[in-house]
Image (cartoon, grey):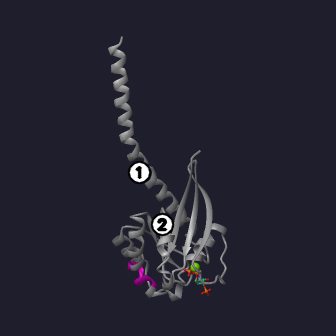
Amino acid sequence: MSEFIFKVVAIGDGGVGKTSIAMRYAYDKFDPKYKATIGVSYAVKKLFHGDTKITLSILDTGGQEMFDYIRPFYYKGASGAIIVYDITREKSFKNLDRWFDNLYPQTGEIPVILVGNKTDLIDERVISIEEGTDYAMHKGVIFYETSAKTGENVVDVMNELAKVIFQEKEKVKVLAEKPMKSANKEKTGASRFKKWLFK
Ligand code: G3D
Ligand code: MG
């Protein structure tokens, strides 16, 4: 059985629910009294994709402006990301471009899922599903809406991210193995040729 550990970062404005999503996913609980994350917090979850064991290590970055200068260190080595906004707070949606612009220069084009959180606050919604979907399509990323409070879609989002990261890595592996395979073939061919020579 193969085993992978993927580092995943949760980014987006402060207060959108990054810590709550990570805690709901890893420990299936929602605590309304999380203190604003100072610096970084970790959540770890193990899952299976077929017979492959995947450990997701979720880094939940502070999100506060004052941490801009240390944020690049958190991004280093990230295999995937969720970029989260709050469907009840327009500013967190307007700031998404900034989060995308922050991420890619540090990580390259890693798999990203856009997450509109807090769907349980039905009456406070200001960003529609259509707006979220359009933005995600424009960025070429997958889109989900979640509620860390009720747990809606949280497991689905994170499992999907793990799956996409795994599939991307497999693609890279297949591409990397191809030249080796042809090199092996050549070698086999050469040794056959040698055998034939000394027969
Ligand atoms: P952050 O890590 O992105 O900064 P937090 O966000 O996870 O700390 O959440 C910020 C606030 O939003 C918290 O409330 C938290 O309880 C709340 N929250 C997070 N996710 C949801 C959700 O899905 N639904 C609702 N209704 N609230 C959510 P406080 O009161 O501590 O500010
Ligand atoms: Mg937090």
Three-letter residue code for mark 1 = Val
Examine the structure image and report whether residue 3 is included in the region drawn in magenta. Answer: no
Visible residue check, residue 115: no
Q: Mark 1 vs ligand 1: CB under 8 Å?
A: no
Q: Position of residue 49 (x, y in %)?
A: 55, 53
**Marks 1 and 2 in Cβ contact (< 8 Å):** no
Q: Residue at x 42, y 69 (%)?
A: 106
Residue in front for this viewpoint, 97 or 135: 97
Q: Quadrant of residue 178?
A: top left
Q: Position of residue 196 (x, y in %)?
A: 34, 15
- Look at the magenta stretch and give its main secondary structure: helix
Q: What kind of element bears circle 1?
A: helix
Compare marks 1 and 2 and give the one earlier in the sequence. 2
Q: Amino acid at mark 2?
A: Lys
Q: Which residue is mark 1?
A: 172
Q: Quadrant of ligand 2?
A: bottom right
Q: How far across and how far down the image is residue 184, in percent?
A: 39, 33
Residue under numbered circle 2: 76
Q: Give the image location of residue 141, x and y in percent.
A: 40, 67
Q: Residue at x 66, y 84 (%)?
A: 33
Residue 20's label in the rendered image is: none
As displayed, is residue 4 above or below residue 150?
A: above
Q: Nearer the viewer, residue 61 or 153?
A: 61
**Segment tinted magenta in the rendering:** 92-97
